[in-house]
Amino acid sequence: MSGHSKWSTIKRKKGALDAKKGKIFSRIVKEISIAVKEGGSDPEANPRLRLAIQNAKGVNMPKENVERAISKADKEGANLQEVTFEGYAPHGVAVFIECLTDNNQRTVSSVRAIFNKKNGNLGTNGSLSFIFDRKGVFTIKKGELDPEEFQLEIIDAGVEDFEIEEDVFIITTAMEDFGNVQKKLDEMGVEVENAQLQRIPNDTKTLPAQEAGKVLRMIEEFEDNDDIQNVYHNLELTDEVMEAIQQDY
C-alpha cells in the first residue's frame, strides 16, 4: 500500500478522524458545494455529488447536514475553485496538495508559509507529474463479506489492487475504471466507507523514523488548513516509522 494510504489507515484506527470530525464535515460540505456548482443538485444525474454524499455517509455525517449543504449550494452557488500545489518536504519527500478555496491568494500564502517554516520547497505545477499517478481508491468495511468471493466478483470491474486490512478492504483502480467499480459495488449492494480519486506515488522515499516524523508533522500541518482537502506524499512508511507513529496516536 502506498505511504499516504497507510497513514490514513493508522489515523482511522487510532480515532484521530473522530477528533477532527468537524473538519472532515467541512471538507465534505465543500465537495458537495462544488459538485452542485458543476453538475446540479440531483445526485442521480451528478456522479460527483453522489460520491460526496456517499463519503458523507461513510463518516456518519447527519443526513440533515448533507441536505442543508446541497440546498445552500443550489440556492447561493459555490464561490469555490480547485487549486493544487506541488513541492518537496525536507529530505526530498514529494508532496502534492489539493485545495478547494474561496480565496486563492490566502491559500497560496498559507501553503507557501508552511513549506518555508518546515524547510520545504514549493515547486511549480506539473513538476511532480512523474511521481504521482491518479487512481481510484475505495475503502470498504468487511462486514459479512467473504474476502475471496468478494474479490472474485469485483475484480472484473477493473480492480488493479485488492488489499485486506484488519476491518476493511482497500481497492485500487485505474482512474478510467473508477466509475465502473463504483457502479459494480452499487449493483452488489456493498456499502463503501470512502471512495475518491487519489494521487498514488509510483516511487517512494525511505527515511529514518526521526526524519520521517518531521515530514509527517509537516503533512499534518497542511491537513489542518481549512482550504486544503487532500495531501499526498511519497514517504515510505516502514515498520520502524509505523511503530513510531502508532506511539503518537
Image: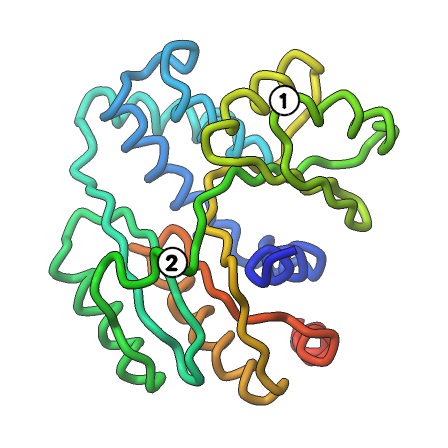
186 w.r.t. 226: above or below = above
Q: Position of residue 242 (x, y in %)?
A: 70, 73
Closer-to-camera residue (9/177): 177
The secondary structure type at the circle numbered 2 is: loop
Q: Residues within 10 Å of mark 1 (few under 14, many from 20)?
A: some
Q: Residues within 10 Å of mark 2 (few under 14, many from 20)?
A: few
Gap in Å between the C-alphas at discs 1 and 2? 27 Å
Q: Place residue 33 in its image quadrant.
A: top left
The residue located at (67%, 78%) in the rendering is 241
Tell me the amino acid under the disc marked 2. Phe
Q: Position of residue 166 (x, y in %)?
A: 81, 50
Q: Quadrant of the C terminus?
A: bottom right
Sequence-first disc among 1 and 2: 2
Q: Which residue is mark 1?
A: 157
Q: Residue furthest front?
A: 130
Q: Place residue 193 in its image quadrant.
A: top right
The numbered dot on residue 130 is: 2
Tell me the amino acid under the disc marked 1. Ala
The residue located at (46%, 35%) in the rendering is 175
181 w.r.t. 222: above or below = above
Q: Place residue 208 in its image quadrant.
A: bottom right
